[in-house]
Amino acid sequence: MKKEVVDVLIIGAGPSGSVSAAYLNKHGINVKIVEKSKFPRYQIGESLIPRCMDNFEEAGLLDCLMTQNYEKKKGARFIRGEEKGVFDFSKKYGDGWDWTWQVPRDHFDNTLINEAQKQGVAVDFEAEVIDIQFKGTDSFTTIKDVDGTTRQIEAKFVIDSSGFGRVIASKLGLEAPSQLAKHGSIFTQIKDVRRPSGPNGTLITFEVISPEVWFWYIPFSNGNTSVGFVGPMDWINSFNGSTSEIFFQMLKKADHYYDQFKDLPLEFEPYQVKNIAKNVTKLHGDGFVLTGNSAEFLDPIFSSGVSFATESGILAAKLALKQLQGKSVDWDEEFVAYIKRGVDVFTSYVKEWYNGNLQEIIFHDKENVTIKKQICAVLAGYVWDETNPFVRKHNRLIRNVAQLIEMEKKMEATQ
Ligand SMILES: Cc1cc2nc3c(=O)[nH]c(=O)nc-3n(C[C@H](O)[C@H](O)[C@H](O)COP(=O)(O)OP(=O)(O)OC[C@H]3O[C@@H](n4cnc5c(N)ncnc54)[C@H](O)[C@@H]3O)c2cc1C
């Protein structure tokens, strides 16, 4: 079998793998990505949040994105019946980017990986990892190429950025149940020929159908709009038919969008994802680390996937570099503890969304400007800023504020 030796092998050419590889390449490391698909390839995860801009910038991949004319995302809108909650990232608490993009991921991911290649990153497409063995920190990865032949790559360190491929988690038995509810999703794209002019046609919108069920509207600059539903698996399973039949049955429940899309053709048969939330027993081991969706995925409600994928991708690259330079790395402290702090904040927000507390705050008609700014910073992905009380006290502040609003409403009702 053919053999190749690299310093760092990265599995997967999504945003996580691209930023890791670009960062390591910039710092003189011999890095290779192996990617099972041929690019461009479809991927879900089209609404970004501002924090990921910092990561693309640090990896040297922001300039190539700036020239692509993607739809700018300056905030987000939530609607429930006649109620509305609109967040404007330029009004968020604290520092950081106040905009990002809504992107068709086939084009976006391809732009990133092309730029990484231009900068010198070696990428093998249509090269699937089928096995991986570790001897101490050295690894021996077996790749199956598109013609069916196999070969081996030896690496001093492996970054697994294989997304829902979850290569190392499945090979080493690291899968763990998520603490979040079992949700599923069904999604597609539509040529949005009736798109309203102005912000209503460009702003990402989440329409609440019931406390646990919601619809997303993510308009792109190419005229297509990504549309999808998320809800408990029981709700998803209560529909029958093909995924496009199910999609149109669900669309009847999205009052604000039914007329806009009811008779339009779908760009492709909707995809269905079951049990979205994923988790693992550990994020690193001798000679490897897991980043992005290959490690953990919470829920799409706050569009945090690509931000976490790039945050963990950059950090993994920095620590791998340090280790290869012969310095000691405390992976638990420097990687796991940091990532977990951010994940814990978003986990609270996801739980508080689905139990209704966060919706109570977002749709409250008497807006508290300070609270809104602080929650807005979390929705922008700045979940490591401990000066923000809605980060620091994430596990109780939302509940407390929601309880106050409820009490206030009860008092008003009795007056
Ligand atoms: C319904 C739904 C909606 C979502 N909406 C959003 C959103 O609005 N915003 C957001 O930020 N995130 C969203 N996400 C999450 C988002 O899809 C992911 O977080 C993001 O794509 C993760 O990036 P990544 O680089 O970790 O993995 P990916 O982008 O999945 O890339 C992994 C790559 O690894 C490759 N690979 C897999 N197995 C192998 C193998 N054996 N060998 C070689 N290569 C392999 C794959 O082909 C793929 O190209 C959503 C997810 C779901 C399920």
Image (cartoon, rainbow, N blue to C red):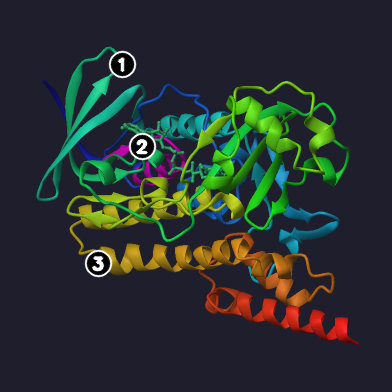
Specify few, some or many for label 3: CA neighbours under 10 Å numbering under 14, 14-19, or 20 or more: few
Q: Residue at x 73, y 36 (%)?
A: 251
Residue under label 1 = 146
- Identify residue type, mark 1: Val
Query: Which portion, as a residue range, is magenta?
Result: 9-24
Q: CA distance from mark 2 to mark 1?
A: 17 Å
Q: Main secondary structure of the magenta part?
A: helix
Q: CA distance from mark 1 to mark 3?
A: 38 Å
**In the rendered view, would you say 211 is above or below 255?**
below
Which is more toward the observer, 409 or 135? 409
Q: Residue furthest right?
A: 415
| 2 vs 1, front mark | 2
Question: Magenta includes 161?
Answer: no
Q: Upstream in the sequence, badge 3 or badge 2?
A: 2
What is the number of the mark on residue 330?
3
Which image quarter is the N terminus in?
Answer: top left
Question: Magenta includes 10?
Answer: yes
* Cβ of mark 3 under 8 A from ligand 1: no
Residue under label 2 = 165
| 3 vs 2, front mark | 2
- Evaluate whether residue 96 shows in this view: no
Specify few, some or many for label 1: CA neighbours under 10 Å numbering under 14, 14-19, or 20 or more: some
Q: Say whether residue 410 is left or right of residue 157.
A: right
Q: Residue at x 54, y 66 (%)?
A: 383
- Evaluate whether residue 317 shows in this view: yes
* Cβ of mark 2 under 8 A from ligand 1: yes
